[in-house]
Image (spheres, coloured by chain):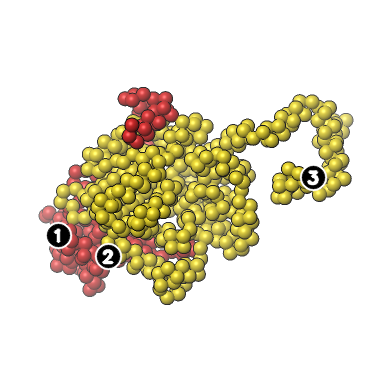
Chain colours: A red, B yellow
């Protein structure tokens, strides 16, 4: 018998169950979802994010804001259509070759992504790793800039989970919740930012019409 | 084996260490209290109840959820490796590393890998495994095991770290904590970008989506599961929860209970190899499911509930014993109240019989547990079992029970005891009592027994 059978057999014996025996339905989780207006969500996100929030009235203003945030640093941007529509390609390198992308991320001053959604209650950026949104852009550079339309701003994790039954699918291998900068308190509980991931997080929230994608 | 008395005495006499343990656990403890207070999280008690119910349910039908998880992992393009022992888990990893010629392995914090001494086993096979969580990295350089489940190096100061870095990394002696963190960033970044395999633990396994959930603050776990070509996650079979949306309950509780954070900096929900068109992420994904004694706990209805543990460390921070003796005086990697419960079960009762007795049964651990494990209750059950198997204890309690049922004899024994105590105020400090007495003073002998007082009052 291989270990798979051994373990399953031990589990069944411990529980007094037979192979194929049906389970009871699991208890429902408690989902804390309460309605907040977009303005209230925005105010909450602003107060909770451990980083800067810039609100832009329409997408044509994104370029100038990101240019100012970059302040001359080199940057890598994801191939997300929203970023392309904001013409950020002129400010940052966009890569389609894995090796080039990795090298660029390892040396760039900032990484620019969009986001699957934002969570107001915790000040969280939710990213789904997919062909348009690689994992390393928000991870290797010391600064992370996320450009996100305001209609992607949700109240909290519970709301996101109730509308996203599966965090991943055939196009996406991972989902990451980013709540502020990388930090550690491992030495004397003294807070240090940017220990492995970005030490700075900036979110640009875009209001108004969606650009032609 | 009995308690490591001299080591404990050393810990108690070390004023710096006492301060470090007390203030660090104290801060976690206070932060937790604030984070779960009714004005912050009015649903806290409901969440605990729900979390406990979901865990209990998952354990009760674990066979089904394990198979569901395996199917989902396969669908995502990954592979589940079943390991009934730590050796089996390590064997698989060693073989894979040799096959893929991956001599450098980066690791993010995993108590499960500590439990099976994975680093030692890898080193034995000439594989370099580097811990990347800052605290774990410091400990690996120092050759120590974690002092705390969540914050592994709380017993160290910036001066200790400066010494270790200078000695092991050859960098200039520097006691500025920011600089120390940046040294680690620089050294470890190089490792992340060249390692062939990344090994992580798992805080949760989602049966419905085949996902591994990893919670952290530094970003080292993200790097570990995203940068190398191969990602291996290693987890005990009890880490399962049925559905993705159950995560809401557990993530609401985990960060708050561990450090008072509503959410930690990073929560990764990863499902294996990069999909078609993705530019990064691992090319291969393996999930090692570990038994290593867990099915024994599952089979024991008295102790099963300890498998609900989500390793938040809240019981350590709340425990008056842990806060004095610290993590290294516990015999195994799991310290504190939950360690007292699972160590005898997973590592054998014979060597760890003293553990359940090293508790004041104050109940703090049970009160703070986010998944409502009745740790004091489990300790009492363990004590009962151990006392039943100890002939000296058994006969002592038999005599006691015999006396209690005979009021006249009981009164007489009390009178003899009081007289002896008055004659020998330092008490019975000899024979089998000497060891017991070395930590305790007898109370001053009362002039009358409780029963005498009672009689007088009745008059």
Task: From the top left corner, tell me how far across and down residue B443 is, in percent.
Answer: 78, 46
Placement of the N terminus of chain B among the 4 image quadrants = top right
Q: CA distance from mark 3 to mark 2?
A: 69 Å
Circle 3 SS class: loop
Q: Residue A31 or B20: which is nearer the viewer?
A: B20
Report the residue marked by disc 3.
B428
Report the residue marked by disc 2.
A141
Report the residue marked by disc 1.
A97
Q: How many marks?
A: 3
Q: Residue B350 or B364: which is nearer the viewer?
A: B350
User: On what subunit does the disc labeled 2 rest?
Assistant: A
Circle 2 SS class: loop
Circle 1 SS class: loop
In the image, is A172 to the left or to the right of B49?
left
Density class for disc 3 (Cα within 10 Å; few <14, some 14-19, many ≥20) is some
Q: CA distance from mark 2 to mark 1?
A: 18 Å
Placement of the C terminus of chain B among the 4 image quadrants = top right
The residue at the far bottom in this view is B172
The residue at the far front in this view is B125
Q: Residue B387 or B128: which is nearer the viewer?
A: B128
The residue under the point 85% across, 42% down is B420
- Pair 3/1: label in front: 3
User: On what subunit does the disc labeled 3 rest?
Assistant: B
The residue under the point 29% across, 37% down is B70
The residue under the point 45% across, 70% down is B167
Q: Is residue A194 above or below residue B234?
A: below
Closer to the chain start, of discs 2 and 1, is 1
């Amino acid at each position: 018998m291989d270990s798979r059978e051994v373990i399953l057999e031990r589990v069944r014996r411990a529980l007094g169950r037979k192979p194929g025996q049906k389970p009871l339905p699991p208890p429902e989780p408690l989902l804390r979802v309460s309605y907040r207006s977009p303005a209230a969500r925005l105010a909450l996100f602003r107060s909770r994010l451990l980083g800067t929030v810039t609100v832009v009235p329409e997408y044509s203003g994104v370029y100038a804001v990101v240019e100012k945030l970059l302040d001359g640093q080199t940057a890598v941007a994801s191939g997300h259509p929203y970023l392309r529509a904001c013409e950020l390609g002129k400010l940052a390198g966009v890569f389609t070759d894995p090796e080039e992308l990795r090298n660029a991320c390892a040396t760039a001053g900032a990484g620019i992504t969009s986001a699957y959604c934002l969570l107001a209650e915790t000040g969280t950026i939710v990213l789904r790793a997919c062909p348009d949104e690689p994992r390393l852009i928000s991870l290797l550079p010391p600064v992370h800039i996320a450009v996100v339309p305001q209609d992607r701003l949700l109240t909290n994790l519970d709301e996101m989970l109730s509308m996203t039954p599966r965090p991943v699918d055939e196009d996406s291998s991972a989902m990451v919740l980013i709540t502020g900068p990388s930090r550690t308190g491992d030495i004397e509980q003294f807070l240090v930012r940017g220990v492995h991931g970005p030490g700075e997080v900036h979110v640009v929230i875009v209001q108004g019409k969606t650009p032609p994608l | 084996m009995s308690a490591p008395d001299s080591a404990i005495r050393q810990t108690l006499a070390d004023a710096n260490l006492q301060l470090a343990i007390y203030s660090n656990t104290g801060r976690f403890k206070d932060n937790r209290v604030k984070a779960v207070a009714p004005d912050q999280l009015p649903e806290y008690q409901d969440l605990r109840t729900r979390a406990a119910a979901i865990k209990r349910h998952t354990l009760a039908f674990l066979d089904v959820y394990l198979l569901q998880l395996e199917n989902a992992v396969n669908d995502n393009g990954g592979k589940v490796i079943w390991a009934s022992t730590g050796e089996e888990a390590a064997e698989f990893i060693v073989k894979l590393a040799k096959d893929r010629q991956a001599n450098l392995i980066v690791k993010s914090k995993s108590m499960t890998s500590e439990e099976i001494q994975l680093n030692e086993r890898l080193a034995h096979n000439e594989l370099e495994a580097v811990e990347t969580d800052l605290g774990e990295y410091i400990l690996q350089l120092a050759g120590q095991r974690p002092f705390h489940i969540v914050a592994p190096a709380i017993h160290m100061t910036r001066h200790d770290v400066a010494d270790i870095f200078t000695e092991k990394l050859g960098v200039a002696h520097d006691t500025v904590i920011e600089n120390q963190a940046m040294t680690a960033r620089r050294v470890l970044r190089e490792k992340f970008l060249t390692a062939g395999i990344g090994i992580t633990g798992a805080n949760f396994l989602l049966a419905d989506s085949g996902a591994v959930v990893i919670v952290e603050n530094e970003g080292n776990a993200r790097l570990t599961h995203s940068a190398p070509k191969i990602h291996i996650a290693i987890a005990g079979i009890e880490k399962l929860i049925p559905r993705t949306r159950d995560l809401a309950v557990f993530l609401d509780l985990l960060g708050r209970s561990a450090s008072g954070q509503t959410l930690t900096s990073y929560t990764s929900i990863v499902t294996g190899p990069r999909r078609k068109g993705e530019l990064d992420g691992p090319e291969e994904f393996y999930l090692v499911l570990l038994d290593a004694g867990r099915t024994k706990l599952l089979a024991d209805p008295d102790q099963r509930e300890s498998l609900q543990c989500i390793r938040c460390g809240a019981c350590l921070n709340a425990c008056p014993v842990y806060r004095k003796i610290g993590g290294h005086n516990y015999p195994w990697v799991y310290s504190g109240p939950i360690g007292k419960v699972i160590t005898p079960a997973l590592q054998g009762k014979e060597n760890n019989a003293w553990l359940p007795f090293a508790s004041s049964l104050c109940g703090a651990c049970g009160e703070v547990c986010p998944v409502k494990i009745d740790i004091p209750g489990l300790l009492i059950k363990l004590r009962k079992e151990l006392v039943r198997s100890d002939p000296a204890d058994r006969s002592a309690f038999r005599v006691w029970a015999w006396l209690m049922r005979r009021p006249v004899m009981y009164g007489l024994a009390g009178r003899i005891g009081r007289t002896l105590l008055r004659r020998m105020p330092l008490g019975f400090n000899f024979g089998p009592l000497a060891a017991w007495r070395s930590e305790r003073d007898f109370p001053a002998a009362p002039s009358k027994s409780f029963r005498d007082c009672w009689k007088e009052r009745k008059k």
